[in-house]
Amino acid sequence: MSPAEASTSPVIAAAEAAAPILEARTADRVASRAAVRRSPTRVATAASLAVRRAEESRHDEEARIIAERMAAAERSLAAERAAAAQRRAATVRAAQVRARQVRARQARVREARARQVAPRIVRRVPARMESVLAFARSQVGKRYARGGEGPSSFDCSGFTKRAYALIGLRLPHSSGGQAARARVVSRAAARPGDLVVGSGHVGIYMGGGMMIDAGNPRTGVVYRRMYAGLHIERF
């Protein structure tokens, strides 16, 4: 044995002697860690975590389903509201069409009645009143509008003002003012073209107990029989 070998052999021997102990300690630590991983507490903790994650996943899915259902309900409600609005608009349009048709039929009936009585109107008509009567007949069926003087709408004194202007009479736009410009005559002496006067109202006498006047918003310019409370005046 050389001096070097004699000096290192105790170290090697000590290392070799300690090796089994170190290996045993290492094995113990590995076994301890494995035991910890396999311990009931750790297993229970892992299981609880898995349950929580499963619950969270389920809640997320339920929330997603609820959100989708709410969005679908909102879309359905919006579609129903739009359909209802369209139905209301269609109903309004249909009512407007029917109202126009009714007004047109009423105007045609009034015009037809005016034409039917025309032969009776021409008896004892002063020559200067021909244009007044022709104008009055041509306006039957037009709208009533407060303050209207034509051409599409009239009130009572606006209608007579326009008619008598054709023969050079410049009348005020007032039923009372027009009546004050004329003189009263009896119904028996009435002639076509005379002024028909009532309380706050005027029209044009057409003969045969009939008149044309801008009555009210419901009738418009209408050919009709003189009613109680009216009298005749002449310019």
Image: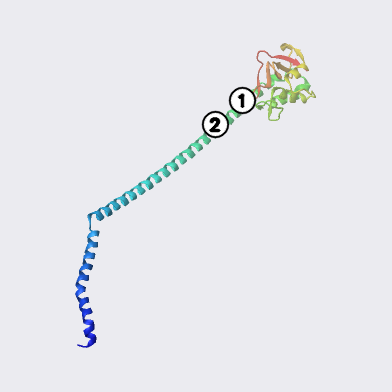
Q: Is residue 138 left or right of residue 33?
A: right
Q: Which residue is mark 1?
A: 109
Which is more toward the observer, 62 or 22? 22
Per the image, label 2 sits on a secondary structure element best described as helix
Give amino acid for label 1: Val
Q: Position of residue 74 (x, y in %)?
A: 44, 42
**Quadrant where the N terminus lies?**
bottom left
Residue plotted at (36% across, 49% down): 60
Q: Is residue 5 left or right of residue 89?
A: left
Q: Position of residue 164 (x, y in %)?
A: 76, 23
Q: Is residue 229 left or right of residue 84?
A: right
Q: Position of residue 145 (x, y in %)?
A: 67, 26
User: What colour scheme has been applied to the protein in the rendered image?
Assistant: rainbow
Mark 1 and mark 2: Cα distance apart in space: 21 Å
**Res. 158 image quadrant:** top right
Looking at the image, the residue that sits furthest to the bottom is 2
Where 3 falls versus 113 (above or below)? below
Evaluate if marks 1 and 2 touch, with contact meaning CB atoms under 8 Å apart. Answer: no
Which is more toward the observer, 216 or 26? 26
State which tag comes first along the sequence, 1 or 2. Answer: 2
Q: Residues within 10 Å of mark 1 (few under 14, many from 20)?
A: some
Q: Residues within 10 Å of mark 2 (few under 14, many from 20)?
A: few
Which is more toward the observer, 112 or 74? 74
Where 28 falls versus 68 (above or below)? below
Q: Which residue is mark 2?
A: 95
Give amino acid for label 2: Ala
Q: Position of residue 2 (x, y in %)?
A: 21, 88
Per the image, label 1 sits on a secondary structure element best described as helix
Residue plotted at (73% across, 11% down): 186
**Quadrant where the C terminus lies?**
top right
Looking at the image, the residue that sits furthest to the right is 168
